[in-house]
Image (cartoon, rainbow, N blue to C red):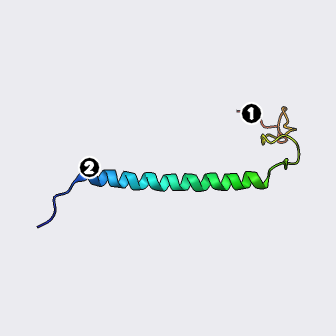
């Protein structure tokens, strides 16, 4: 005879396994970031600012003179 399913227990076990996997991934990510920060300690990126925005962004019309829409 087949066993009686215990859905709540099975769901809790799946969630527990999922949480453990997430925690392991997060810890690995933190360690990798920590190592990366230790390697780059005291080293600045060339160009000064690191916000990723271009310094000389044109405010006027584009080269193709198309109107902005």
**Above/below status of 44 relative to 62:** below
Q: Give the x, y percent position of residue 44.
A: 85, 47
Q: Residue drawn 78% across and 40% down?
A: 51
Q: Give the x, y percent position of residue 63.
A: 85, 41
Figure quadrant of the C terminus: top right
Foreground of the two, 7 or 49: 7
Callout 1–callout 2 Cβ contact below 8 Å = no
Residue at mark 1 to residue at mark 2: CA–CA distance? 57 Å
Q: Earlier in the sequence, mark 1 or mark 2?
A: 2
The quarter of the displayed image where residue 67 is located: top right
Q: Give the x, y percent position of residue 28.
A: 59, 56
Foreground of the two, 53 or 64: 53
Instruction: Label 1, secondary structure: give it.
Output: loop
Foreground of the two, 36 or 47: 36
Q: Can you name the residue that lies furthest to the left here?
A: 1
Q: Residue drawn 69% across and 52% down?
A: 34
Is 2 on the left-hand or right-hand side of 28?
A: left
**Above/below status of 41 relative to 3:** above
As drawn, the label of residue 54 is: none
Is 12 on the left-hand or right-hand side of 27?
A: left
Q: Which residue is mark 1?
A: 68
The quarter of the displayed image where residue 3 is located: bottom left
Foreground of the two, 54 or 44: 44
Disc number lying in front (1 or 2)? 2
| Few, some or many residues within 10 Å of mark 1 (<14, 14–19, 20+) | few
**Above/below status of 28 relative to 45:** below
Q: Can you name the residue that lies furthest to the bottom here?
A: 1
As drawn, the label of residue 8 is: 2
Q: Give the x, y percent position of residue 18.
A: 42, 54
């Amino acid at each position: 005879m087949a066993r009686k399913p215990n859905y709540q227990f099975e769901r809790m076990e799946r969630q527990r396994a999922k949480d453990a996997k997430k925690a392991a991934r997060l810890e690995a990510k933190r360690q990798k970031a920590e190592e990366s920060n230790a390697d780059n300690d005291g080293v600045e990126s060339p160009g000064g600012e690191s916000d990723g925005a271009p310094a000389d962004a044109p405010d006027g019309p584009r080269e193709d003179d198309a109107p902005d829409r």
